[in-house]
Image: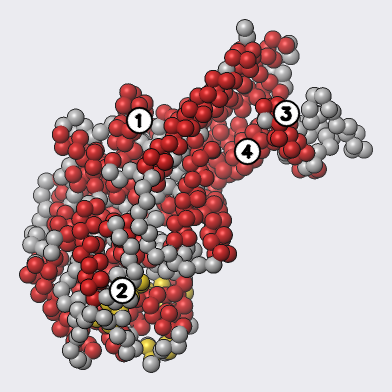
């Protein structure tokens, strides 16, 4: 085994703990997770258990006596050639980390977590998509040093200032609420940042806003299994929050950003947090219940799409209650109830590979063209992403909703793209944007 | 020495020894890897919510399977586990007698014993139960009442054999046609072993293929020996789910649901 491969395997072993050991050892290959994976529509090989098997093969070879001795007879082994690496990369990037596999596994195995570790293994072997690698590197350094990112941030601050009609009080220490938008939102859904800011201002909240960008997604390294990048970013965000001393941190990004900060940050940075981290949907729901504002009901055929990370973090009821108050035309998406939701298909970094995100590529100094193994890989992945988006769109169309409200920029991007692909029957917006003109104080 | 004597008198202690050793090894890995890390702020939920979350962790996969993987639910969960292996292993009258011999408190389950047949078998060889039915056909009197028509060794064994055979056969096209690498040699061997235990148990009960004592002892010996093999390899194979993985996985999932308020 060569040095690089050995080091890649060793790095994955740092992820071993009782829980990942259980995920590795306990699968009986029953396949109950199969139909619940959003990427299963792209091919039967993309069932969660089959994707996780790629990491299990490596760990079986390294960690078990039978795997070490019998090798491929017992499905144990390291990638040997380009075909193996290609297959592994294809498997690793047909996962949105939505958690449906965990919810449906009789043994509580989260295949997505193993797939995240597999992505880390591949990254060490030089198999991370260039754009994700670059984003992770920039984010874990000082993102505000990137001139273009700073320009973008300043333009967002300008728009927020225009939206609220007064000077924005940035980095104000002692503010009760610290609103932390991400660079990705500034690119994909700037209206979300403006709407959220306007709502906070309208409601007279004591809030502040970072004068410099803190991250693309606050943990974008997780998309390529780079724990160190995640840790560095979250440490930086945490020290900023501590400096401001806010009691509440408000996020409008309900994807990876929310889960990373709300649930993964303490263990990653090795420190407890003493401030509350909330998604804007939760925060507004609390204020609505406390009668701080009223919602003007309109006749809109509206549905809520659960961003997978919000749903798996326990934010399900709050946005629904708000939307029900906003319209009698509220309806559920037929295949997205309870713990299940059909994912938009763009999570876990997949949407970031889209050709439509030229602005993002420009921002980080990448050309639109990719070369080598990546060219086929991205072309094929985007085809599969399109299949998943179409499936999601069918569900929305079936519900009859004209507006799909959600809480994550990636979901908004994917849903709108899916709508475009299927005739444009609906549009997706962020909950802050949707509520902006309906909130009455 | 025949296979029966070998399995009963020679293999019992090695089986228990290997099982205990294997379990110690497997469980110690979990203990050694444990490291305390700072916790996020838990969502506040009521005790009732937490109890429901625990129930949900166990129920959701079954519910999801009923909705989306009906064949797997019927064969793998319902026939193989719920109706087959679990009641047979723990409640078949012969098994209760066997468990009680080695672990006397197990005899408390005696009233729940499942007979080998709905019509002809006594609960045990030494304490036959008088049939109470006035029907021309004699029925065994068990606590299960009319359910005994299904809850008897014959029917349950056949159900378990059907479930296991289906799970075994469905793996072939998945492995060789769909080329799913997650289907491993261990999946086949585990199911073949289970099938051997079920079939030999059924044959021993019915004194098949012939009723002479030597054949009976050989078949029963195979049943006991294959069961011992299962117990020995249990800590090292997917059978581990039965004693640990399933429970650990579900409890961890429930714990995560408590933290997140799901």
Whether residues under marks 3 and 1 lie with C-beta atoms below 8 angstroms apart, the answer is no
Give the chain of mark 1: A
Q: Is residue B203 visible?
A: yes
Residue A231 lies, in percent from the top left, at 23, 57
The answer for which chain carries disc 2 is A
Same chain, marks 4 and 2? Answer: no
Q: Position of residue B72 (x, y in %)?
A: 53, 43
Q: Residue at x 43, y 52 (%)?
A: A102
Label 3 to label 1: alpha-carbon separation: 38 Å
2 or 1: mark nearer the eye: 2
- Mark 4 vs mark 2, foreground winner is 2
The answer to which quarter of the image holds residue B218 is top right
Residue at x 52% of width, y 45% of height: B247
Marks 4 and 2 sit apart, C-alpha to C-alpha, by 50 Å
Q: Could you tell me which secondary element the residue under label 4 belongs to?
A: helix
- Earlier along the polypeptide chain: callout 4 or callout 3? 4
Residue for badge 3: B97
Residue occupied by mark 2: A249
Q: Quadrant of residue B15?
A: top right
* Secondary structure category for the residue under label 2: strand
Q: Which mark identifies residue A64? A: 1
Image quadrant where one finds the N terminus of chain A: top left
């Amino acid at each position: 085994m060569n040095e690089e491969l050995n080091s890649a395997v060793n790095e994955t072993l740092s992820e071993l703990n009782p829980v990942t050991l259980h995920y590795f050892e306990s699968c009986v290959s029953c396949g109950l997770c199969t139909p619940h994976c959003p990427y299963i529509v792209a091919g039967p090989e993309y069932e969660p258990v089959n994707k996780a098997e790629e990491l299990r093969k490596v760990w079986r070879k390294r960690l078990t006596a039978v795997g070490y001795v019998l090798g491929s007879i017992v499905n144990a082994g390291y990638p040997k050639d380009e075909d193996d690496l290609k297959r592994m990369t294809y498997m690793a990037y047909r996962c949105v980390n939505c958690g449906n596999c965990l919810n449906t596994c009789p043994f509580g195995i989260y295949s997505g977590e193993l797939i995240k570790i597999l992505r880390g293994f591949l990254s060490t072997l030089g198999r991370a998509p260039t754009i994700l690698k670059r984003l992770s590197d920039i984010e874990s350094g000082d993102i505000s040093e990137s001139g273009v990112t700073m320009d973008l941030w300043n333009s967002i601050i300008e728009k927020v200032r225009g939206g609220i009609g007064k000077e924005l009080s940035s980095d104000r220490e002692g503010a009760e609420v610290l609103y932390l938008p991400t660079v990705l939102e500034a690119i994909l859904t700037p209206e979300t940042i403006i709407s959220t800011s306007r709502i906070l201002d309208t409601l007279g909240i004591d809030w502040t806003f970072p004068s410099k960008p803190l991250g693309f997604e606050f943990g974008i390294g997780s998309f390529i299994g780079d724990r160190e990048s995640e840790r560095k970013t979250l440490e930086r965000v945490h020290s900023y929050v501590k400096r401001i001393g806010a009691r509440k941190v408000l996020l409008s990004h309900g994807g990876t950003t929310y889960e990373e900060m709300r649930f993964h940050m303490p263990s990653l940075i090795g420190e407890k947090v003493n401030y509350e981290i909330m998604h804007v949907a939760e925060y507004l729901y609390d204020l609505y219940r406390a009668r701080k504002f009223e919602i003007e009901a309109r006749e809109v055929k509206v549905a809520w799409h659960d961003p997978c990370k919000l749903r798996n973090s326990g934010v399900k009821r709050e946005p629904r209650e708000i939307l029900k108050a906003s319209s009698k035309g509220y309806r559920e998406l037929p295949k997205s109830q309870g713990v299940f939701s059909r994912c938009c298909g763009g999570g876990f970094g997949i949407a970031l590979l889209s050709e439509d995100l030229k602005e993002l590529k420009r921002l980080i100094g990448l050309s639109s063209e990719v070369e080598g193994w990546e060219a086929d890989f991205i072309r094929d992945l985007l085809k599969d992403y399109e299949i998943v988006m179409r499936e999601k769109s069918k569900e929305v169309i079936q519900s009859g909703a004209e507006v799909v409200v959600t809480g994550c920029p990636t979901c908004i991007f994917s849903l709108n793209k899916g709508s475009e692909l299927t005739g444009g029957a609906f549009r997706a917006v962020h909950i802050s944007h949707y509520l902006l003109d309906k909130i009455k104080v | 020495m025949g296979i029966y004597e070998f399995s009963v008198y020679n293999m019992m202690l090695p089986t228990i020894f290997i099982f205990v050793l294997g379990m110690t090894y497997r469980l110690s890995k979990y203990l050694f890897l444990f490291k305390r890390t700072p916790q996020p702020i838990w969502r506040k939920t009521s005790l009732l919510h937490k109890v429901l979350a625990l129930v949900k962790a166990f129920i959701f996969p079954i519910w999801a399977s009923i909705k989306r993987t009906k064949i797997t639910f019927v064969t793998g969960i319902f026939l193989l586990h719920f109706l087959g292996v679990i009641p047979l292993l723990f409640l078949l009258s012969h098994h209760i007698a066997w468990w009680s011999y080695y672990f006397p408190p197990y005899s408390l389950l005696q009233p729940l014993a499942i007979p080998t047949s709905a019509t002809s078998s006594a609960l045990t060889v030494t304490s036959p139960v008088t049939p109470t039915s006035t029907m021309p056909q004699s029925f065994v009197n068990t606590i299960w009442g009319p359910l005994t028509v299904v809850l008897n060794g014959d029917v349950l064994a056949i159900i378990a054999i059907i479930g296991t055979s289906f799970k075994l056969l469905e793996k072939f096209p998945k492995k060789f046609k769909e080329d799913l690498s997650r289907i491993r040699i261990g999946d086949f061997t585990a199911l073949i072993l289970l099938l051997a235990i079920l079939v030999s148990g059924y044959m021993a009960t019915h004194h098949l293929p012939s009723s002479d004592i030597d054949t009976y002892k050989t078949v029963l010996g195979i049943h006991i020996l294959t069961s011992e093999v299962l117990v020995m390899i249990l800590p090292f194979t997917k059978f581990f789910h039965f004693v640990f993985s399933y429970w650990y996985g579900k409890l961890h999932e429930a714990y995560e649901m408590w933290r997140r308020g799901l």
